[in-house]
Each structure stands twice: as structure tokens, then as C-alpha cells.
Image: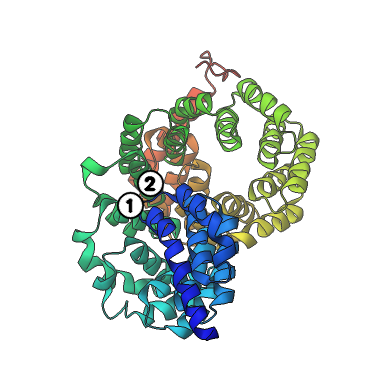
Amino acid sequence: MLSILLLLFVAACGESLNPARLALQQNDPAKALVLLHPVRSQCAQFSEFHELLGLANELSGNATGAEEALRTAVSLSPKSARLLTELGATYLRNGKATEAATTLDQALVLDPSNRATVKYAIGAAVQSQNWQRAAGLFQQIGAEKDPASLQQEPTLVLWFAQTLIETHRSDKIDRLLSPKLGSMSSRLLFALGTLFAQHRMFERAVDYLQRVPRESADDALYFNLGLSYSHLHKVDEARKCYFQAADKNPRLPDVYLHIGLDYTASGEPRMAIPWLFRAYAQASSRTDISYALAEQLLRLEYFDTAQEILGPALEARPHDGLLLTADGDLKRAQGNVAAAIDSYEKALREQPGSTAALVGLARAHISQGKSNEARTLLKMALSGDAEEPAANGELGLLEAHEGNWQPALEHLSRAWTQDRSNPTIALELARTYRRVNRPREALQLLSSLGPATRDSSEVHFELAQIYTQLHRPVEAQAERDVFSRLQAQAHSGFLRFETPRTYVH
């Protein structure tokens, strides 16, 4: 008799929930919540009531209420894979990857073949960066055997590519994904291209981003494509993409910042400054833009204008490590080495391990003849990134000046590979090539420099040395003649103008 009454009670509760169920089907969670309230006392002991309450809360934006209701539903029906999946999905949407993974794993024990549950479990594994778990789940749904099965779910494709990268199997990406490139949506192509760029797979990033149809291309696409080209040292292609991004959206300071940085990287600092000023005009509060602009002004000895940039920035953000580093660079350029060291040390207290501050402090020590202290600082900077160009360049110069040609060659080569904007590095690398009896590489390097650098008397003197080592006396004499002419001009009585300390813009 009791069981019959219980069944009748369940049936009555089910009927009471129908209006709320219908409201949710009509995407009206507010109405569903109103309808659920009067039946709470009647249906509170049934999981379906709490399931509907959880869904209504979630659709209303009440994440906490949704979790609480679904947890209650699971406690009433702990063997329901569906309820566990719903709770896990809610945790996932609320950014609780650990709780989501635990709950979804419980659901998979009950129903291992449920693709929806597996998909949410993959999301939880990706969100918590449990890449081995993600790889196992992709294997469970046969992703590598049949990657086409993922095509209808772009998010899964993106997670699959990321899992392959993070589990060191990126060599499989082309085989598994490339055959389906033609059928990928613009959004998926953009997402994959951006993912590859974030993992420094720039060639592949360019391939995917270029496949986005032009009618779907926006400023973000052109900007990411430009960044990828910049990292590939394809400056002309990068600049074209940045200009296209600016055409789409002229209010993007990052576009102008990177146009300026690319001009700097290609050895054209004077072309960089107007673009950096444009970025600064749009986002003067951004430390990275103020720093980049100040550093280029210092490079061209516009000390007063650099001070005009750094003064207000430091006043607003006196504990910013990057700005303190730039302040140290300014003081060192002005000859106040003690004050520069103080700024660098403040920067390192604010931002321990800062490469820029370590390099600046090393340069200050070098100017005081403290090469051992400088070498320690530069090696510390390289311990975080062995390819960092500024630290490699400075350490290479230090080793070359002390006649340590092999380590000099190693560090100068790394610096020049990463950043070809510094003619001092190029010249010292050429000298080092000559010192280790590799004059042809030295000649090739100096021949690749721009016209402004090639007109340097130091470059022509070095070319004369190289041609002599190559037993080409005619070219050697010609370079000595150019060197002598340039030296004579430098010491002639012609008027010479000092670099102005203020940049007019």
C-alpha cells in the first residue's frame, strides 16, 4: 500500500513540474523559477525538481544556485549519469575545472560511451591542463583514427590540436587536420592559427590564418598574422598585415606599437618613433608602450623627450619595473652611472629576474670596468631564456673584447639571429668570424647590412681586413681608401650638427 501511495505521489509531482518544464523549453527561466517555487514542499525530495531548478538558475545567470540545486539532485540520484554530467558541465562553465573533472569521471564510470560526457570531460582536462587525461579521452572517442568525426564540433578540434601540442605530438597535426582545412569555418581557422602562434609555431600559424576568406578577415586576424610574420623576420609581410589591421580598426595601439617595433628590428629606428608616438597617443598609460618609445628616443639621443615620456609615467607608476629600467637607461646615457645602477636595482626589487634590468645593470658595470659582475648578471638573464638577444649581444661583446672568440661567436650569433637591428652586434660578429678564420661568413654578414651602416668607417676598415684575409688585395685597398676618405671627412673643418635632445613630432 505504501509503495502504491509513493508512486501516486511521484506521478503528482511530475505533473506539477510540467509547467516549469514547458517554460524552460520556451527559454523562459524566470517563469520556470516562479512556477517551481510553490511546488517545492511537494517535490523537494525528488531529483527532477532540483534538476529543473538548477537549469532555471543557470539560464538566469545564478551560477551558485545552479550548482547547489544540481548537487542536491545528484545526492538524491547518485547513480544518474545524466545528473552527474549536468553538474560537471555546470562546474566547467563556472571555471571549476577540478570539480568538473571529478564529477564527469564519475559519470563516465556509469556511462562510458556517452559522447556528451566525454566532451565535457575533455573540456575539464584542457581547462585544468591535464593533457595526458585529455589525450586518453580523445583516444576513447577515436579522434586520431577518425579526425573527421570532430569536424562538426570546432571546440573539440581546437582542444585536440592543443592536446597534441602539449603532449609533444605536434608532428601529427598536419596529417590529422590538414586534409580538412578546406571545410573549416573562418572562426576555427582563426582559433587554430592563433593557438599555433601562441606556441611559437609561426609557419603553421601563417598557413591557417591565411586561409581565412578575406571577406571574413577582421583586425584581429590581420594583427595575429602580422605578429606571426614578425616572428618569422618577414618584416614587409608583417607591416602589410599591420596596415590592413589599422585600416579595419584605426584605434588599435598594439598595431602601431608593433609597426614601430618592426621598424626597430629592421634597423630603422627613426622610422619607428612616429608609429610609437601614435601608439602612445592612444594608450599613454600602458607601460610597454612608454618603455618602447623611451628606449627608441634614447637610442637616437633624444634625451629630453625620453624624460618627458618617463617622468609622468614614473610619477603615476613609481614601482613599475619596466619604467624603472628605462629610467636607468636614461641616467646611464646621460653619464650618471651611480643613479642608473640605483634605478636598475629598484627595478629588480620590483621585478626579480627582469632581463631588461639585468642587462642594463650589466652595461653599467661594464662602463665601470667590472666585467666579472657584468658576466654574472648576463648569465643570470640568459638562464631564463638562452636565446634572449640583448643579453646574448652584451655577453658576446664582452667576450669578444676579452679575446674569448668561441663564446663570443656563440652569443653574438644568437643575438644577431633574434634581432638584426643593432649594427654594433653585426660588426663585432663579423670581426669574430674573421678572428676564427671564417672570413667569407664575415663578408656575407657585412654585405647584408643597410646602406646607412655600410657607410660607417668602422665597417669599411673591417672589410679591408676581411679582403686581406681572403687574399683579395684590390678590394682590400679600395676599402682602405673609403675608410681614409671617411676619416678625413670626420676630421675636416666642415660644420657638424649635434643630435638635438628633443624630438619634434
Asked whether the beta carbons under mark 1 and mark 2 sit within 8 Å of each other, the answer is yes
- Specify the amino acid type for callout 2: Asn
Q: Is residue 475 above or below residue 5?
A: above
At horizontal 48% and vertical 62% (from top left) the residue drawn is 52
Few, some or many C-alpha atoms within 10 Å of disc 2 (few <14, some 14-19, many ≥20)?
many
> In the depicted view, which residue is nearer to us: 505 or 223?
223
At horizontal 52% and vertical 79% (from top left) the residue drawn is 6
At horizontal 59% and vertical 23% (from top left) the residue drawn is 302
- Specify the amino acid type for callout 1: Phe
Q: Is residue 381 above or below residue 240?
A: below
Element under label 2?
A: helix
Q: Quadrant of residue 117?
A: bottom left
Alpha carbon separation for disc pair 1 and 2: 9 Å
The percent position of residue 360, horizontal first and vertical second, equals 68, 44
> In the depicted view, which residue is nearer to us: 202 or 294?
202
Residue of label 1: 190
Q: Nearer the viewer, mark 1 or mark 2?
A: 1
Q: Say the numbered circle drawn on residue 224.
A: 2
Q: Say the numbered circle drawn on residue 326.
A: none
At horizontal 36% and vertical 66% (from top left) the residue drawn is 156
